[in-house]
Image (tube, grey):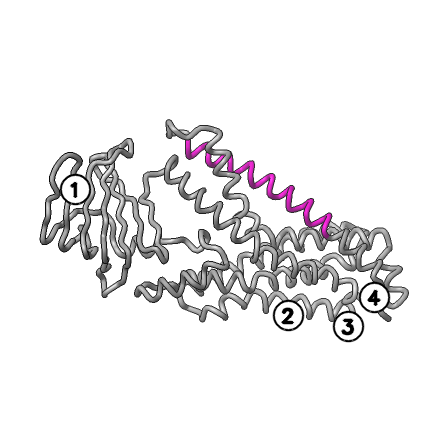
Amino acid sequence: MNFSPILTRYISRNFLVSFLTLLLLVMGLILLFEVIDLLRRASGSETATFGAVLAMSLLKAPQTVQMVLPFAVMLGAMVTFWRLTRSHELVVARSIGVSAWQFLTPVLLLSLVIGVINVAAINPLAATFYTKFDQLQSQYLSRNNSLQVGRGGLWLREGQPDGTMAVVQARTVRQDGLTLQLDRVTIYRLDSRDRFLSRIDAESGKLVPGHFDLEEAVIYHPGNLPEPHDSLRLPTSLTLSRIQDNFAKPEALSFWELPGFIEFFESAGFSAHKHRMYYYSLLASPFLLCSMVLIAAVFSLKPNQRGGGVMRRVMGGVAAGFLIYFFSRLIYVFGLSESLPLLLAAWSPVLVTGMIGMAMLFHLEDG
């Protein structure tokens, strides 16, 4: 028989309410612990106020939403199916010929839509906010160097031992072995209050361990004549490996920016392996949500209401969610280490979870 539109809307509405309620509850708890952790880290900082800590927590929240989304979908589906089963609504639906696959369909479709919205809209927002969170974290909680790279070239901000700051900009960058080649380099030196001290312009340069080697450089000091140099050596604590590890974290780039960034990064001679892995995992994430719905259905469509059966199924569902998360993170690490091909590492959690859920549902429903 055809699936009733009324029942479809009813199940969809129940799932959306359960999903959003659980997502807000989980995010509220995580936000609370995030604020506590940031307050602990900021206890030694004189400039980090409670307002700054709260702002950092809120800026990180969209990134956290992406992390907890599979759990929220799974728990929302479990609550929906339990509620409909306890009220005997699914029993009545089954008695008129509606199969489990038919009332799973609206939840699966909604999960797919949520996943697409997450990738297309929430992820760009999370990337923008995460970049601002990283900037505030560097400002208030650490003195790490700030590094950025993009189509406009290389930008980095490095603290000096004497308390001054150096801001380095290069129009183009490329890797040549263990050396980073720079073209059209500008270096600004600032004091501890970000006041201008001097500027260095160079036609080219390179980063080697321990220093920058600049060619055809000119130094500008306020109130003095320019000082030309055929070559100039400037000390630095930066290394090529540090730049590769810190440049443009995948989380700071949106889904729409990643392909262009990967192309640019690889054209400069860098490895974009980490960014490709993140990009493929984003592509697979909507289907992972659908797989979580199948797992939720296994633990909630036929709950035993006697002898503590419900509690056992709750614990089983939660344990299954953590096992899936652990498995997905383990495979993700294997992908980053190049132990597995990137596509296999990104799609393995989806395929394995989906096949297990479908096999168990076929057994429970038709076995």
Q: Disc 1 vs disc 4: Cβ atoms closer than 8 Å?
A: no
Q: Disc 3 vs disc 1: Cβ atoms closer than 8 Å?
A: no
Res 245 quadrant in image: bottom left
Question: How far is mark 1 from mark 2, CA to CA?
Answer: 66 Å
Chain-order first, disc 1 or disc 4: 4
Instruction: Name which residue type carries label 2.
Output: Met
- Where residue 299 sits: x, y (%)? 72, 58
Question: How far is mark 2 from mark 4, CA to CA?
Answer: 24 Å
Question: How far is mark 2 from mark 3, CA to CA?
Answer: 16 Å
Instruction: Name which residue type carries label 3.
Output: Gly
Residue 367 is tagged as 3
Secondary structure at numbered mark 4? loop
Question: How far is mark 1 from mark 4, CA to CA?
Answer: 76 Å
- Where residue 19 sits: x, y (%)? 69, 50
Residue neighbourhood size for the residue with mark 2, other residues' Cα within 10 Å, grouped as few (<14), some (14–19), many (≥20): some
The residue labelled by disc 2 is: 355
Residue neighbourhood size for the residue with mark 1, other residues' Cα within 10 Å, grouped as few (<14), some (14–19), many (≥20): some
Which mark is in front, 2 or 3? 2
Give the extent of the magenta segment.
16-42
- Where residue 354 sits: x, y (%)? 63, 67
Chain-order first, disc 3 or disc 1: 1
On screen, residue 280 versus residue 191, left or right, reads right
Which mark is in front, 3 or 1? 1
Which mark is in front, 2 or 4? 4
- Where residue 294 sits: x, y (%)? 69, 63
Instruction: Name which residue type carries label 4.
Output: Phe
> What is the quadrant of the N terminus in the image?
bottom right
The residue labelled by disc 1 is: 220
